[in-house]
Structure formats: structure tokens, C-alpha cells
Image (cartoon, rainbow, N blue to C red):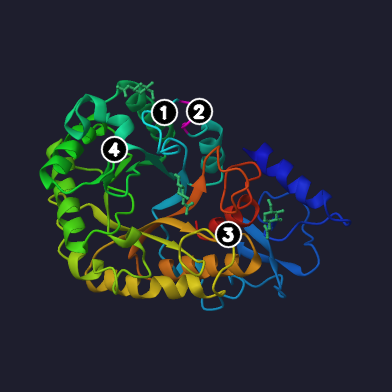
Amino acid sequence: MKTALFSLAVALASATPALSTAVWGQCGGIGFSGDATCDSGSACVEVNDYYSQCQPGASAPTSTASAPGATACSSSSARTKFQFFGVNESGAEFGNTVIPGRLGKEYTWPEPSSIDYFLGQGFNTFRIPFLMERVSPPSTGGMSGPFNDTYLDGLKTTVSYITGKGGFAVIDPHNFMIFNGATITSTSDFQAWWQKLATEFKTDKNVIFDLQNEPHDIPAQTVFNLMQAGINGVRASGATEQLILVEGTSYTGAWTWTTTSGNGDAFGAIKDPNNNVAIQMHQYLDSDGSGTSPTCVSSTIGAERLQAATQWLQQHNLKGFLGELGAGNNTQCVTAITGALCEMQQAGGAWLGALWWAAGPWWGDYYQSIEPPNGPAVAAIVPTFKQFM
Ligand SMILES: *[C@@H]1O[C@H](CO)[C@@H](O)[C@H](O)[C@H]1NC(C)=O
Ligand SMILES: *[C@@H]1O[C@H](CO)[C@@H](O)[C@H](O)[C@H]1NC(C)=O
Ligand SMILES: CC(=O)N[C@H]1CO[C@H](CO)[C@@H](O)[C@@H]1O
């Protein structure tokens, strides 16, 4: 892992005429032996005793913890750190028009080397998207039929790899509340499916159950009812300790949580008999909030889009979990991401964690790819997240 980061730093440095550290690179901290000089236009800013970073436009090399453009971010000690920090590890949900699909052709599992890289950087949480039709084949009874052991074993192998190293694995049926072309409507089917799946993972304390990725075009109250049934199913399996994440309609967007989605009105009533549930929201910083453009609305849009949702969590005494966060790897977007993480950690513990979308071996040059060693987001986003660990 260190090797990957080192060679990346060398690659960036060698692209510039003078030997100095590129913007967002590490330039100091206890145990650091690299170059403390930053490329022109950036300056070395001390983030904590262990980490200093070259930040664009920064002027005072000794100032503490002030992220670019986010002067309102309080010092590290005044913020509530996340329990969960990580990335999505895409692959098993790819090729969703081909069921069951072939391993290595339509879908793949995350690379152990990618997981190792992030663990080595201090990240501890990995969200594993997969497809319900691959684990519960429509040809053998669908949601109430037997599991496909080949695919389930792939999921279990990935999960145990992560949790065996002390990480947290978020199990994410990436189906948008649609199974085999039809919107899921039966709370009892959904509850039974979750009871059966959670049974497979109930002895692993580091598993997190994410009941469904991004429901949409379904009323918030209907999604709420399904999520409540899912919680009941997980707990009925005997998995009583693990964290459960519920998602709302409208792609569970934080920016519309209290307004157009209707989620704010429905989800205040969520109940977990074991008191370990959080609301998973997603947020991208491009104009339509879809994570498809590397251009951010502004350098403050991250904090702005999370603000109302943060207040809603506080008012309802609920915990939030930002399961997908993404933006371009340019200076404006990185500043906006920094602002978003500040906002979250200044909310008195309302947010349990944040995950970047996304790592995974098949993203190619997608601007949000954080797949090591050189996904376009690695150089800017890994160090940015590290400021908040
Ligand atoms: C089970 O999954 C494997 C691997 O994806 C696949 O080859 C096989 O066809 C699947 N079986 C069914 C019944 O879908
Ligand atoms: C954005 O990603 C590209 C492609 O990897 C890279 O060349 C560029 O340096 C990155 N920009 C920043 C600010 O990290
Ligand atoms: C925002 C984003 O990256 N969305 C992608 C999520 O992953 C699926 C495949 O898993 C893509 O189709 C989406 O574009």
C-alpha cells in the first residue's frame, strides 16, 4: 500500500520540473521523510501532528487544520470524528441487464489489493454493492427462492476479507427497490428476504446491513414501510448487534431529504428494537446531484446541501451515514468536499460516517474513481479524507 502511494507521489512529482510535492500531497508530519516543499501555487499546511498537506492558495505553512476555502471548519479536537470512513467497492452490481451474468465478464468482485490500500490509509469501511437477482435468481423462485451459492460465496469472501482485517463491510443490495423489473411492494417478502440474508452474516459483528440502495419513484411512506420491515427481518434473524442503514426515496438524496422527497416527514418514526439504526443519505455536488459531472456548483455546495438534513437528524435525535459522496477532482470540488466533511463533523455526532463513491476495478477513467493506485480521485481525495480521520 505504501508502495502504491509512493509511486503515485513520484509520478506526480516527476511531472513537474522542480522536485517538490504536488497539490494535495503530503508534505510533513511525524515520520514523514518526503519533500516538504510544495509546488508553486500551493503551501504546506499542518493538518495534525502526523499529517501536513500541500493545499492550493494556502499561505501560512504553520496554520492548523484550516482547509482551503473552509475557514469555518473548527479545529480537529472540536469536531466529532466519524466511526466509519471509507469507500464504495463497486463491481458485483455491474452489468445489471445481464442476469445471472458471468464473473469476470459482466461483473466482478472488489480487489483485495484495493481494500488493503484503503485499510493502510486509515479507512475502515467498505460498501459492497451487489444485485439481488444474482443472489436470489428469478429462475429459481426469486426473492423467496434459494440463494445462488456461487454468487453468495463471492459476497461472503469479500465480506470476510474486510472484516477479518478489522474493517466494516456494508452489505448493499444495489437494486433501487426494483427486483426483476418490478418495484418491490410487499413488506412481508422484503422482511423475509432480509431475515434469510442476515442469517448468513449474523455472527459477523463488523457487517453493516444497508437495506436497499436508492429507492426512487416510490412514495416516501411506502419506502419507509419497506425499510421498517427490513429492520424487523434483520433482527428476527438473530443479528441483533450490527448497525442497520435505511435509505429513503428520491435516491436517498440529502439535499432533498426535508423537502421534495417527503423522506423527512416519513422517516422520523423509524424504530429498531436493538437501537442501532442510521439513516443513509447520498450526496453529489454537481448541478443535478447525480455524480455525472466533474463540475461543482460552488466551493461551498457540499456544506450547503447537507445543512437541512443535518438539522433534521439533530431534531429527530437520529444518526446519519453519508453512504455516497462524490465530486470532481478539481480544486473547487475538493474545497466543497472539505466543507461537507467539516459540516458533518461539526454536527455534534449526528453523522456516523462518510463513504466516497467509488472504488472498484472497472471504473476506467471515471472522474470519481478512487481505485488505487491512480484512479482520478485518489491523489486529491485520499489526503482530503485523511484530514478528517
Ligand atoms: C449462479 O451464479 C453463477 C455465478 O454468477 C452463475 O454462473 C449461475 O448461472 C447462477 N445460477 C442461477 C440459477 O442463476
Ligand atoms: C485529477 O485527476 C487527473 C487524472 O488522474 C490528474 O492528472 C490530476 O492531477 C487530478 N487533479 C487533482 C487536483 O488531483
Ligand atoms: C454516480 C455513479 O457513479 N453512479 C453509478 C453507480 O454505479 C452504477 C453501476 O454500479 C452506475 O451505473 C452508475 O452510473
| 11 to 287, vertically: above or below | above
Whether residues under marks 1 and 2 lie with C-beta atoms below 8 angstroms apart, the answer is yes
Q: Secondary structure at mark 1?
A: loop
- How far across and down, in percent of the image, does residue 286 sit? 52, 66
Give the CA distance from mark 2 to mark 4: 32 Å
**Amino acid marked by disc 3:** Thr
- How far across and down, in percent of the image, does residue 346 sit? 41, 71
| 67 to 372, vertically: above or below | below
Residue 346 appears in view: no
User: Disc 2 marks which residue?
Assistant: 105
**Amino acid marked by disc 1:** Gly
Give the CA distance from mark 4 to mark 3: 29 Å
Q: Secondary structure at mark 2?
A: loop
Within-10-Å neighbours for mark 4: few <14, some 14–19, many 20+: some
- Asked whether, in this view, residue 73 is left or right of residue 365, the answer is left
In the rendering, which numbered label is found on residue 253? none
User: Disc 3 marks which residue?
Assistant: 384
Q: Identify the residue at image location x=62%, y=70%.
A: 332
